[in-house]
Image (tube, grey):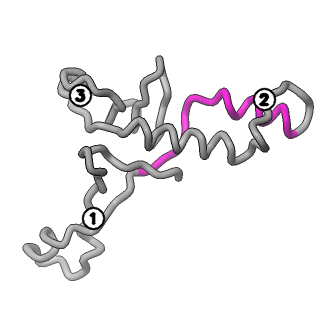
């Protein structure tokens, strides 16, 4: 899955389809048939990815590591996955032997999907 930043909105994409979006516009969520993303979670992922190869916020266009750092800050797409958790109630009501087979998306306190860097 890819987390994309487009026009200051974050989208979770899979095979060209929008699965989730970071927005407070309820009608937009319903129109897409998508889940909601936390902007804070998305920003944390983009910051983590930007800093992974960049040292101390270097953004100058210089040959070597600094040039790479400038380029990596301009990326607008990151590999992510949805954080999953085991659902005890599903496991309890089913005939599945291992609870780890009953994974569901983990949500934050606001009902937003929690993403993590892949």
Q: Image check: 102 left or right of 84?
A: left
Q: Earlier in the sequence, mark 1 or mark 2?
A: 2
Q: Residues within 10 Å of mark 2 (few under 14, many from 20)?
A: some
Q: Is residue 79 above or below residue 91?
A: above
Q: Percent x, y for residue 111? A: 24, 46
Name of the residue lying farthest toward the left: 93
Rendered position, 9 above or below 80:
above
Q: What element does badge 3 sit on?
A: helix
Which residue position is annotated with label 2?
Answer: 59
Give the image quarter of residue 76. top right
Work out whether mark 1 precedes mark 3 in sequence or the reverse, and give the earlier one: 3
What stretch of residues is rendered in magenta?
A: 65-81
Q: Is residue 15 above or below residue 26?
A: below
Quick check: is 78 in the magenta stretch?
A: yes
Q: Residue at x 53, y 52 (%)?
A: 118
State the residue position of label 3.
29
Residue bearing mark 1: 103
Of marks 1 and 2, the one in the foreground: 2
Q: Secondary structure at mark 2?
A: loop
Q: Are marks 1 and 2 in contact (CB under 8 Å)?
A: no
Badge 1 local density, few (<14 within 10 Å), some, or many (20+)?
Answer: some
Q: Nearer the viewer, residue 56 or 83?
A: 56
Q: Residue at x 90, y 37 (%)?
A: 64
- Which residue is at a point 47% across and 37% down the rendered structure image? 3
Q: Is residue 36 magenta?
A: no
Coordinates of residue 18 in the picture (x, y in percent): 34, 31
Q: Nearer the viewer, mark 3 or mark 2?
A: 2
Mark 3 or mark 2, which has the lower sequence index?
3
């Amino acid at each position: 899955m890819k987390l994309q930043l487009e026009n200051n909105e974050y989208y979770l994409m899979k095979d060209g389809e929008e699965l989730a979006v970071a927005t407070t516009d309820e009608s937009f969520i319903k129109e897409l048939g998508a889940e909601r993303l936390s902007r804070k979670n998305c920003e944390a992922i983009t910051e983590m990815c930007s800093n992974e190869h960049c040292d101390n916020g270097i953004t100058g266009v210089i040959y070597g590591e600094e040039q790479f750092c400038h380029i990596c800050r301009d990326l607008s797409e990151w590999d992510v996955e949805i954080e999953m958790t085991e659902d005890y109630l599903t496991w309890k009501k089913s005939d599945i032997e291992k609870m780890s087979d009953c994974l569901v998306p983990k949500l934050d306190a606001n009902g937003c999907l929690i993403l993590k860097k892949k």
